[in-house]
Image (spheres, rainbow, N blue to C red):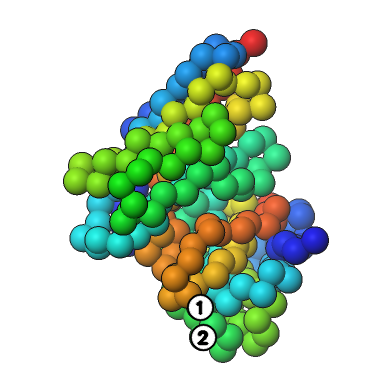
């Protein structure tokens, strides 16, 4: 079955550490996205990528970094510069709107990051 | 960033009844897509329904339907014949090459 796999499901980070969240998709989607969700709130966009080797900052990119070396993979690194990283992180993918179709975005099952 | 507003933080509905969730958005674009997503306690985001702005006809998916008012920039979701499995947080989202989400409405279906 095609889908998006996020790992790990739970992640614990010590103060001052960088951690990397994995996101892999086998849907052959060109576009991929990272969102952050805080308790009881909506999703906020961190970074997105419409094509391999290219990505753009979202609304809350400070303290985060990404890479897009392969179409299937879009890892997110939470750096020590992110002051409040405890949150639920969701990865998504989609067919770009330029194709003329839009079936919505497919989401992974998320990673819960906690600072200890 | 596009602004998406959901003014109802929580809604409660009796099983088999109907509930309507409101959503307004702000954009200067003419062609865009709107979505409703459901997030149950498992936290998996599930697409409920989508609407293309250039289509006047309101989208319907089984018990879920929307009332899309383009001029008013309004996009409400109606859940008919509510079921216990509909209990979830519902998010309205606007797509302009990236999804912008509202704050969400928590829907509780009572038995």
Question: Compared to A112, does B107 lie above or below?
Answer: above
> x%, y% of residue B8?
38, 29
Q: Could you say which quadrant of the image residue A34 lies in? A: bottom right
Chain at numbered mark 1: A
Q: Name the one closer to the observer, A98 or B40.
A: A98
Q: Residue at x 50, y 44 (%)?
A: B49
Callout 2 crowding tier (Cα within 10 Å): few <14, some 14–19, many ≥20: few
Q: On the rendered image, what quadrant is the C terminus of chain B found in?
A: top right
Q: Is residue B61 left or right of residue A114?
A: left
Residue with the mark numbered 1: A50
Judge by depth and name the residue closer to the eye, A67 or B56: B56
Q: What residue sits right under mark 2 in the picture?
A: A54
- SS under mark 1: strand
Q: Position of residue A21 (x, y in %)?
A: 69, 67
Query: Which dot marks residue A69?
Result: none
The quadrant of the image that shows the N terminus of chain B is bottom left
Chain of the residue under label 2: A
Label 2 near label 1: C-beta < 8 Å?
Answer: yes
Q: Is residue A27 above or below residue B48?
A: below
Instruction: Give the residue displayed 61% in from the left and 47% down from the top.
Output: B45
């Amino acid at each position: 079955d095609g889908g998006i796999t996020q790992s790990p499901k739970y992640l614990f980070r010590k103060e001052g550490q960088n951690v990397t969240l994995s996101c892999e998709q086998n849907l052959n989607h060109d576009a991929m996205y990272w969102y952050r969700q805080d308790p009881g709130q909506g999703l906020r966009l961190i970074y997105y990528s419409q094509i391999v080797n290219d990505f753009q900052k979202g609304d809350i990119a400070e303290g985060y970094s990404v890479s897009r070396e392969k179409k299937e993979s879009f890892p997110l690194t939470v750096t020590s510069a992110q002051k409040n990283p405890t949150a639920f992180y969701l990865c998504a993918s989609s067919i770009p709107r330029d194709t003329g179709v839009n079936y919505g975005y497919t989401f992974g099952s998320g990673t819960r990051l906690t600072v200890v | 960033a596009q602004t998406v507003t959901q003014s109802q933080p929580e809604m409660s509905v009796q099983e088999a009844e109907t509930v309507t969730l409101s959503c307004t958005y702000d954009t200067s674009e003419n062609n865009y897509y709107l979505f409703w997503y459901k997030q149950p306690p498992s936290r998996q985001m599930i697409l409920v329904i989508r609407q293309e702005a250039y289509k006047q006809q309101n989208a319907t998916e089984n018990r879920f339907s929307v009332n899309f008012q383009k001029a008013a920039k309004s996009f409400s979701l109606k859940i008919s014949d509510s079921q216990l499995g509909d209990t979830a947080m519902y998010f309205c989202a606007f797509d302009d090459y990236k999804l912008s989400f509202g704050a969400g409405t928590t829907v509780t279906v009572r038995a």
